[in-house]
Image (tube, rainbow, N blue to C red):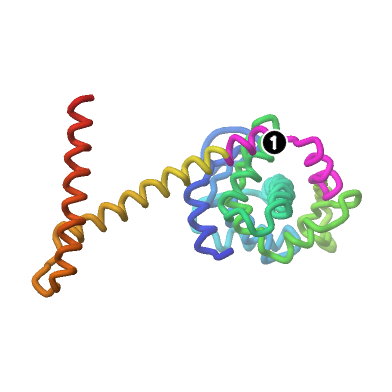
Amino acid sequence: MTQDVDGDLELSLQPDATPSSGGKGASKRGSNYSQEEDIQLCKSWISKTYWERITAHFHNFRGFHSDRTANSLEHRCGVIIKECMRFQSYYEEVERRHPGGVPYQEHILEAQARYAKASQEKSFTFFHCWLEVRHTKKFAKADKRPSKSKEINLSVETQQGDGTQSPAKKARPPGQKQSKEKLKRNEGGDEYKDMMGNLMAMKAEELDIEERRLQWEQEQKIMFCDMSNMDKHQKAYLMAKRAQLAKAASASVGDATSA
């Protein structure tokens, strides 16, 4: 899928800033992380290994005020990647069920519904981060590790000589077997049916509106086209069509008046 579609989805599905460990204020330690911070953190995590280097990259390339420490950034990134991996598993599950028959945007909507179902109706708040990491090798490598041994050791290696080593963050999103079991139990089935029903109804309405618009344009061409260059047969046909349209319009007005 193209980056343009990702950008459109990011604008339409963009969540509010998500909380970290608590506190208030956009730039204080322990405060909520802004989307700008989350996105730059993802870019730095993708670009570098070792948290000393990731932190330096974050502060060198950010275009906003932030005094996040390495520990804070590592903890936040652990949460982000863990939740993005969970969402990715649901997204891939939807793709397997509908390999070519469902538009990309509807894959996203169904994956969000499945995520919320499994998270006690809590929505996926890291969509802006998922768009940053989803196509990267580093995220793919972390996401494809066996579920029993999967760990998000976000720096990959531990900085040599650094006495303050942070513990690895573990994440175990649903694997293929677990996803298949959920499908057999039809978890989220009702939400999916409702969502797809609404989408189909919206599409039917859009098609009806488009069909009426095209019909109206055709009628306008018939009623107001220039007959000066037509032969008598063409003129006769056009006059008959105009008479039919005028009769139908009169009947429609009469029905509306009687109602």
Vertical placement of residue 128 versus 198, above or below: below
In the drawing, does residue 39 fall left or right of residue 156?
A: left
Vertical placement of residue 244 versus 17, above or below: below
Q: Residue 250: which quarter of the image? A: top left
Residue underneath mark 1: 189
In the drawing, does residue 258 fall left or right of residue 30?
A: left
Q: Residue at x 20, y 61 (%)?
A: 221
Q: Amino acid at mark 1?
A: Gly
Membership of 54 in magenta stretch? no
Which residues lie in the magenta part? 173-196
Asked if residue 67 can be seen in this view, the reply is no
Asked if residue 186 can be seen in this view, the reply is yes
Q: Looking at this view, is 197 or 249 the one in front?
A: 249
Q: Looking at this view, is 142 or 184 the one in front?
A: 184
Residue 13 pos. (x, y %): 52, 46
Q: Looking at this view, is 102 or 19 the one in front?
A: 102
Looking at the rendering, in which quadrant would you find the C terminus? top left
Residue 54 pos. (x, y %): 68, 60
Q: Seen from this angle, which residue lies furthest left? A: 228
Residue 150 pos. (x, y %): 85, 52
Badge 1 marks a residue whose secondary structure is helix
Residue 30 pos. (x, y %): 62, 38
In the drawing, does residue 250 fall left or right of residue 17?
A: left
Q: Residue at x 69, y 47 (%)?
A: 87
